[in-house]
Amino acid sequence: MNQRFGALFPLVIIFILFSVIFILAAILMTTTGVDFRVLIAANCLFFLVSLVAYKIQRKAMDNSNPNVFIRSVMGGMMLKMLVCVAAVMAYVLLSKKQFNKPAVYLSMVLYLVYLSAEVAIMMKLNKSKNA
């Protein structure tokens, strides 16, 4: 498998795993007061933003200047934070009184899962000879 695309395998597995869990647990989450649609949307959002950040960081990894990689990591982090803040603000404004705090808190945990997977992928790629 190509190293560039094989590195994305953990992100794809996380996305599929959490999508299946959220769909199967929709009935349980409805009875506990967690809006599963918010979690599915957050899962999709985090997956897409992680793909964009990976692309930026992978491109910077090929540069001979190490500062480019550091800037890309910081830029990817800023991008993820701004997108997450914008998504929460849009959800607050659109949902008004139906705002679901437990779903937002679980989405924060999901963000940490994607963040740790992305850091692990970058550390693994940075250790390889062809990075």
Image (cartoon, rainbow, N blue to C red):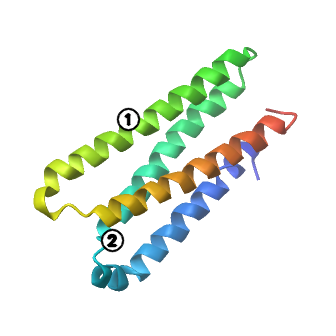
Q: Position of residue 60 (x, y in %)?
A: 65, 25
Label 1 crowd (10 A; few <14 / some 14-19 / many >=20) = few
Of residues 102 and 10, the one drawn nearer to the viewer in this rendering: 102
Q: Residue placed at 70% from the left, 47% from the top? A: 120
Task: Describe the element under mark 2 as helix, strand or loop.
Answer: helix
Q: Residue placed at 15% from the left, 57% from the top? A: 95
Please give the label number shown on residue 82.
1
Of residues 103 and 17, the one drawn nearer to the viewer in this rendering: 103
Please, what is the three-letter code of the amino acid marked with disc 2? Answer: Phe
Q: CA distance from mark 1 to mark 2?
A: 23 Å
Question: How many labels, in total?
Answer: 2
Q: Position of residue 99 (x, y in %)?
A: 20, 60
Please, what is the three-letter code of the amino acid marked with disc 1? Answer: Leu
Label 2 crowd (10 A; few <14 / some 14-19 / many >=20) = many
Asked if residue 9 is positioned above or below residue 127 in the image, the reply reads below
Q: In which quarter of the view is residue 126 placed?
A: top right
Report which residue position mark 2 lands on.
36
